[in-house]
Amino acid sequence: MNNHPTFTPSTPTPLEYSLFSPSKAAEQQRLQEDWTYIHSFLRQIYPPPAKVPKFEENEETLKALLALANANEKADEGWSVFCAVERLGVEELEREEETQTLTKDRNTSILTTLHTSLSNSVSLNLTSHAKTAVILNSTATSPTTLATSILTLSSNISSLQHQLSTLETLTTTLTLQTCFLDSELKTLTSPSFKAEKSLPQKTLETLRQTKLLKAKIGEYDQRLLRNSSSSSIPEALLSSVESARAEVERLQKRVRGVEDGISVYEGVAPEPREVRRQMQELRRELEGWVERRDELFESMVAGRR
């Protein structure tokens, strides 16, 4: 909406100002050009039949609309550059696709011509050579490289076979050891190897009697030394000493028998559950070696293929 101020006859009009001030005239002309540019810009934003919204035409509105128009113009320029770059990229891709198509057709034609010009034997040899390179997974196709790859593969197969043989031997040994340990476990857990409940008490009693008899032997030895000067030793004393010595020997033999019976359990866990756990660990170790053997065998078979 245009607001045109009214001037009284005593007030100078803008035209009178412009007649007397060239700078004012230039300012008025600049404002007129700016508003003309703004109206043109708004007509582009709101093309017919849309209507331009009404607003107050003042200096602040003019500055805001000029800034908006400049920003829009810069955005249009950026978009134009982007569209131009995109168009150039599409054209470049189209040219590249055409070049690739021509190259592919040319290569296909060359391969077809080469294939038809080869004899059957040469074609068969070339096919075998290519298949060998593919099987060996070799990027190079020279005979020297393929021969080296074949020798390396043969060496690897031989090494794997040796490792497989070693693992089979180890597996057999572990199996035998497991069977032996199973048998030993059954024997050790049988009722005949179970210790009597009263064995600790009997052992303590035997040790106590042994100590007492040793003390008596010492006492008898002292008595013998004291009576060694006499010409005759009482028969009762000799009989008592002899019986005591025999009793000591009998008890010592019994102690050795008890110690031998206890030594059988040396190195064996006191609980059957612990013995079973050790056997399970050995079985798991054996299963691990068997799985390792199977993996090596499968990799060797895959390498032969």
Image (tube, helix red, strand yellow):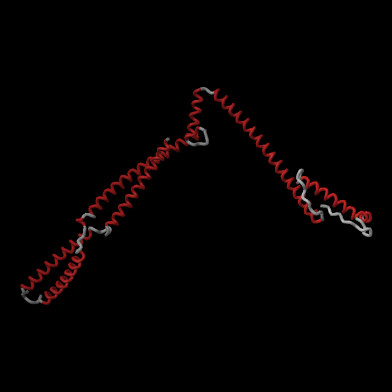
262 to the left or right of 293: left
Q: Residue at x 90, y 53 (%)?
A: 25
Residue 238 sits in quarter: bottom left
Residue 277 sits in quarter: bottom left
Return the residue nearer the eye: 112 or 304.
Answer: 112
Return the residue nearer the eye: 210 or 217.
Answer: 210
Residue 225 sits in quarter: bottom left
Give x and y (percent) for residue 229.
9, 77
288 to the left or right of 207: right
Vertical order, 20 against 129 (above or below): below
Give x and y (percent) for residue 111.
57, 27
Give x and y (percent) for residue 146.
49, 34
Return the residue nearer the eye: 18 or 147.
Answer: 18
147 to the left or right of 290: right
Q: Residue at x 87, y 53 (%)?
A: 28
Give x and y (percent) for residue 234.
6, 74
- Quadrant of the rendering where the C terminus is positioned: top left
224 to the left or right of 141: left
Return the residue nearer the eye: 74 or 59.
Answer: 59
User: How many numbered marks does the figure carry?
Assistant: 0
